[in-house]
Structures are given as C-alpha cells and as structure tokens.
Image: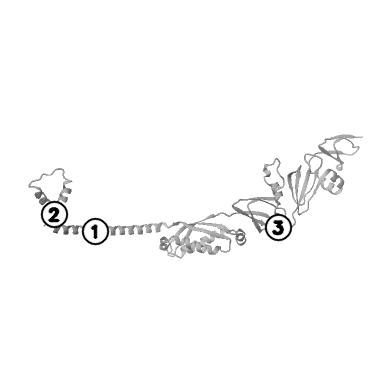
Amino acid sequence: MKIKRVTVKKNERGLLLRNGDFERVLQPGTHWLFAGLDTVAVEIHALERPAFVHELVDYLLAKEPALVAAEFVRVELGENEVGLRSENGVLVEVLAPGTRGLYWKGLVDVQVEVVALDGPAASAEVPAATAARLVQTQLRQRAVAGLAGVLQVQVPEHGAGLLWVDGKVERLLAPGSHAFWKFGRNVSVELVDLRLQALEVSGQEILTRDKVALRLNLSATWRYTDVLQAYKALAKPADHLYRELQFGLRAAVGTRSLDELLENKSVIDEVVTAQVTAKLAGYGLQLEGVGVKDIVLPGEMKTILAQVVEAGKAAEANVIRRREETAATRSLLNTAKVMEDNPVALRLKELETLERVAERIDKISVFGGLDQVLDGLVKLR
C-alpha cells in the first residue's frame, strides 16, 4: 500500500490528478492520499495569481459546474462582448470577445464587467467612465493587459479628430480624450489641424508667353472651414490644394510676357488667388493668402537684362550731363551780356580771375601797377 502526504497552504489550492485525470480540488490543510497502483500527482496553484491557465479549463466549464461555481469566477464572453477584469477593484485586463476562462476565488476579489458591442458604428466609442479608467495606464504599478484592442486618442485644443470606422468617415471628434473598441471593427482617427497653415509650392519651371523659362517659388496660407466636407470630397485635401496652386501659377505666368510680369509682379498673386478660390468652392477649404517669394531668371536672360538696365542708366546719365552743359553755357552767355553793358561787373570778374590765379602762385612781383597785371593776364578784344 502506498500513501502520499500533501500539504496545501492557506493561500493555495491543490489540483489532484490520478493517472493524469482530474479528481478533485484540495483545500488548505494536510492531505493523505492513497495511491495504490495508481499514479497520483498534485499541482499547487497560488491564489495570488488568480488566473487559472490550464488544459482542464474547458473540461471544468463543461462537466464540473458545481465545482466551478464554488472555486472559480467564470468568464464566458460572446463574439460581441468585451470584458473588463478587475482585481480588488483595480482594472487589470481588457478581455477580447470570445474569451473563456476561470479565476480562483478566495484571496483576490476578481470581477468581470461585460460590455456589449452590438449596435451601430457609433457604439464603437468606449463610454467616458470606462475610458477614464484606461488612460494613463503607464502611471499604475501594474500595466493593464489587452489594451491592443482599444484605440486611445488625444485631440488637441486647436484641432479635430476625423473618426474612420470600417473605411467610412463617421464623425468629427471634439478636442479632448477619446477611446474606441477595435474588436470587430477597423477604427482609426486622423488628427486635423484647424489653425492657419502654410503651403510652399517651390521650384516651378514655367514658360512665359514669349518663351522665357522662369523658376518660381510660391507661398500660400489656408485653413479648413468644413473638415467633414473636405474629407468626404477629397482623399487628401492638402495635396489637392497644392495641385490647384500649381495650375493657377501656370495660368498666371504662361499667358503673360516677361515684361508684363516684371512690371507688375502682383498680377501673379491676384490671378492665382482668384482661380484657386473659385476651384476650392464646395470643398471645405479656404485660401487666406498667396504670394510669390522668388522669380529666378535663366543665366543668359540675367545677362541680357543687366545689359539693358546698364544701357538705360547710361542713356539717362548722358541726358543729364547734356542738360547740365547746356545750362552752364546759357549761364556763361548771360554773364557775358551783363559784363558787356556794365564795366564795373567786368572789373569785378577780372578781380575774381586774378584771385583764382593768385591762389596757385607762391610769389607775385607787380610792375606798373594793378592795371599792368590785368592787361597782361586778360586780353579782351
């Protein structure tokens, strides 16, 4: 006769297996087990870890309902149900639909809240009270398991969230925290910035009407006026706006000559703004402003324009010089007429001339008086 002694602690339960087959659950205490010719084994399970992960789970659920009711918390979720498992009042796990399991009673208070997923697509959103229990899980001593089945989103104050459910735009999310069940649905949220945004259209090579290749850089500012309308009509609203700005820029430059563009650079901004604004009507987008940052000419065209500008400036300088020479000649003529009729004025002019000459001579010897000096310097016939 073969007898086996087994001790089960107060925080444990024993699983008695005879010849590999389940026989009963051993409660805390000392047990004397008669083996005889059989193979007897006892598996000890600590109640601190309440999850009963064993190959006998399905058997116990199907064939031992009384034992399960006495020793375990039973969980059997349908295909459209989610379970929120708590231990001692603290959420520890999100159970996926179809989950079946057992949790030991006696030490840890295990509770499972069942949430139904049946209903319209709007029911994909996690209730606010439940969502509050899911956020900031990284601050807990123990992480919540199963969060892969929950989509958590933070929508900033200056933006909005576009909710997609099974490939369709469902609705717009207001700023704040949101959570959605991902089980049985393809759920995603696209964040949209509602503030004024800038868009650069750079490096556009365009031919003018007179076949001059220009390289232009355009800057535009825009915003959403109706996000739902924009995303229902356009796959990528920002890309659509970029293309319309390109088309508007080509329309403004390609129909004008280089001289017209250089004389009135603002015409590009005006034409692009008018054309793009008309194209965006009904798409939930608003163009706030457009401006050409740079107009880059080809190298040879730069040289030609520089020569044109240089020639123009030289011609202007020549005209000014001729005008000044004419004015100087006219002034000399007027002075001569005055001195011809006024001997005193002539005498003053002679003295002025003598003064200018004397400034360049270190020493002057005068013979015959001042009249002799003047007669020697100036011969007026």
Instruction: Indicate the quadrant containing the C terminus: top left, top right, bottom left or bottom right.
Output: bottom left
Left/right of residue 365 with respect to residue 225 in the rendered view: left
- Name the residue tied to disc 2: 344
Residue 75 seen in this snapshot: yes
Q: Residues within 10 Å of mark 2 (few under 14, many from 20)?
A: few
Q: Quadrant of residue 30?
A: top right
Q: CA distance from mark 2 to mark 3?
A: 113 Å
State the SS at label 1. helix
Could you tell me which residue is drawn at 79 percent across and 42 percent down? 109
Left/right of residue 64 with respect to residue 93 in the rendered view: right
Badge 1 or badge 2: first in the primary sequence: 1
Left/right of residue 100 with respect to residue 358 in the rendered view: right
Q: Give the residue furthest to the right.
A: 1
Q: Quadrant of residue 331?
A: bottom left
- Name the residue tied to disc 3: 121
State the SS at label 2. helix
Residue 64 seen in this snapshot: no
Residue 250 position within the rendered picture, expressed as x and y whole percent measured from the top left: 49, 62
State the SS at label 3. helix
The amino acid at mark 1 is Ala
Badge 3 or badge 1: first in the primary sequence: 3
The amino acid at mark 3 is Ala
Instruction: Indicate the quadrant containing the N terminus: top left, top right, bottom left or bottom right.
Output: top right
- Name the residue tied to disc 1: 327
Badge 2 or badge 3: first in the primary sequence: 3
Question: Residues at badges 3 and 1 in contact (C-beta under 8 Å)?
Answer: no
